Image (cartoon, grey):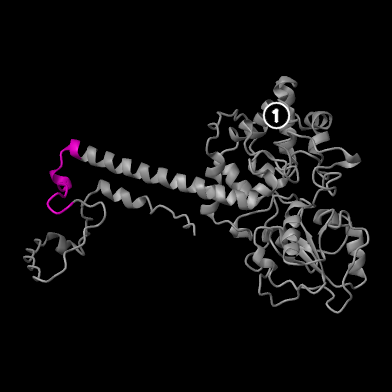
Amino acid sequence: MRRPLRSIPSLALLAALTACGKPAAKAPASAADAAAPAPTPAPAAAPAADAAPTPNPAGASPPGENPAPPAQRTPEEQAALEAKAAEAIRALADAQAKLDVQRGGVLYAKLCALCHGPERKGYAADNAPSLVSPTFLESADDAFLASSIAKGRPGTAMAAYSAAVGGPLQPADIRALVRFLRAGAPDIAALDQRIPEGDAVEGGKIFDAQCASCHGSPTQRRTAVHLFNRQFLTDASDAYLRHAIENGRPGTPMVAYGEKLQPKDIEHLVTYLRSMAKPPASPPPMPEGLPPTPPRTGPIVINPKGKPARFTKLREGRYAPIDEVAKALKEGRRIVFADARAPSDWAMMHIEGAISTPYYDTKTLDDIPNDGTAVIAYCACPHHASGAVVDELRKRGFKHAYVLDEGVFAWEKKGYPVVKAAGQAAIPAPPPGEHLAPGAREGGAAAPTGHEGHGHD
C-alpha cells in the first residue's frame, strides 16, 4: 500500500541553529534580585554506572564537538554557522515544495481533472478554462489561484473547495494544488498596475461588439469565462484583466486584443468590467450549513410511499429531462435526488429534498436504497460530475439511476423547487445548449476544439 505523503517538520525549528546554544535571558524578579550576586552552581552529580546514555538528537554535534558559545565565536564562525542553518532551511523548504507538488497532482486528478482535463488544457466540462495557458499563468499569482480554488465561482460549476465553506480541502491542500499548478509555469510577469482611466459607457459598447458573443452578459453565460461573476471580479485585479485583454489566450478563440484595439479602448473595457464588480455573497454559516453524510438520520427518499418514478423520454437511456422529472415529483413518485457537487455548492443552493453525494466521495452513496427507486444525480456541468455518480451507482447494480439532463441551474431557472441560502446573487442562465450531451452544441455542431482558457473562470 502506498504510504501517505507527509509534511516536512516546521522550518522554524532550524532557525534555532543560528543561536546554537545561546541561553535565553531571564529577567530578574526585582531590583534586589538584579543586584544580588549570582549563586555558585552546585557541581553536577556523577552519573550512575548503569545509567542509560543521554540520547543525541538527530543532527546535533557529538559530545566534545559542540560549537563554541556565542561569546567565544569569531564573526567569521558566526557567519558560517548562520549560512549553514540557512542552507538547511532552504533544503527543507525545497523538500516540502516537492512533496506539495506530488500531493497537488493527486488532488488535481481527484477533484479537478473532471472539468479541466487530465492535462490541464481545459474544456473537459462546462467550458472549464485551461490551467496551462502561459498568458494565464504569468498573470495569475498564487493568491489568485488559492482564492479561486477556495472560493470557487458561485453560479458556475466551479465549486468552493475550501473546508471552511464545506469543501474537501484544508489550507495545506490548497497550497499543494497551487504549487502543482505553478510547477514548470512561467514566472509572474510585471503587470501594468495603472488604475484604469477609461469610460465605462464606452467600454460597455466595445464589450457588446467584441466580447459578448463569447463572454455573455450579466444574466447569461456563454462559452467563455463569465466576466461578470462576482467572485471572479473580486479575485481578478485590473492588471490581470488588462493583461488578458491585451495578450489573449494563445491557442483559443480568445485573441490578443492588444493587436486589434487601441490602448484607450482597452482602458474603456477594463473600466467597464470593474464597474460591474459587486461584493460576492457570504457563504452560509458553518457547520450548520453542511449536509448530513452517511449514515444519514434524515430522509433520503422523497415520497417514500409513492410508486417509483419512471421516465419515457430518456435520452440515450441515461439523461432524464427536467420537465419529466419535475412532473414525476409533482405526482408524488418515489425518487432520490443526489447532488453530485461539493457540499459547499449544496449549502448554497440545492433541489429540495436532495442529499449530498459529491462526485469525489463514493462513500456518500452507501445508504441510498437499491429497491427500484429512481435516483436522479445532478450537477452544474451539467453531465460530468453527475455522470460520475450515475456510473458508480450503475456499477453497484442500480438499474434506475439517471443524470438530470439540463442540470441544476436550468431546474432553478424553470422555477422548480430548490432551497437557497439567504443573500445569494441571482444565478445567470447557463450557456445555450449546455444540456446536450458532452461534445455537442445546438444544431448538432461539435464543441470547438482548442477552446482552452474559457469557461467557468
Classify residue 330 by image quadrant: bottom right
The location of residue 207, given as percent across then percent down, is 80, 31
Most foreground residue, 71 or 53:
53
The location of residue 3, given as percent across then percent down, is 46, 57
Most foreground residue, 400 or 415:
400
Most foreground residue, 262 or 44:
44
Q: Which range is magenta?
A: 62-77
Determine whether, in the image, residue 446 is placed left or right of residue 227.
right
Q: Residue at x 25, y 57 (%)?
A: 57
Callout 1: 10 Å neighbours few (<14), some, many (20+)? few
Does residue 227 lie above or below 319 as drawn?
above
Does residue 161 lie above or below 33 as drawn?
above
Q: Residue at x 89, y 63 (%)?
A: 326
The location of residue 335, given as percent across then percent down, is 83, 70
Q: Residue at x 44, y 55 (%)?
A: 6
**Secondary structure at numbered mark 1:** loop
Determine whether, in the image, residue 393 is placed left or right of residue 209.
left
Magenta highlight on residue 74: yes
Q: Is residue 175 visible?
A: no
Q: Residue at x 76, y 55 (%)?
A: 387
Classify residue 300 by image quadrant: bottom right
Magenta highlight on residue 258: no
**Which residue is under mark 1?**
251
Q: Amino acid at mark 1?
A: Gly
Classify residue 419 by image quadrant: bottom right
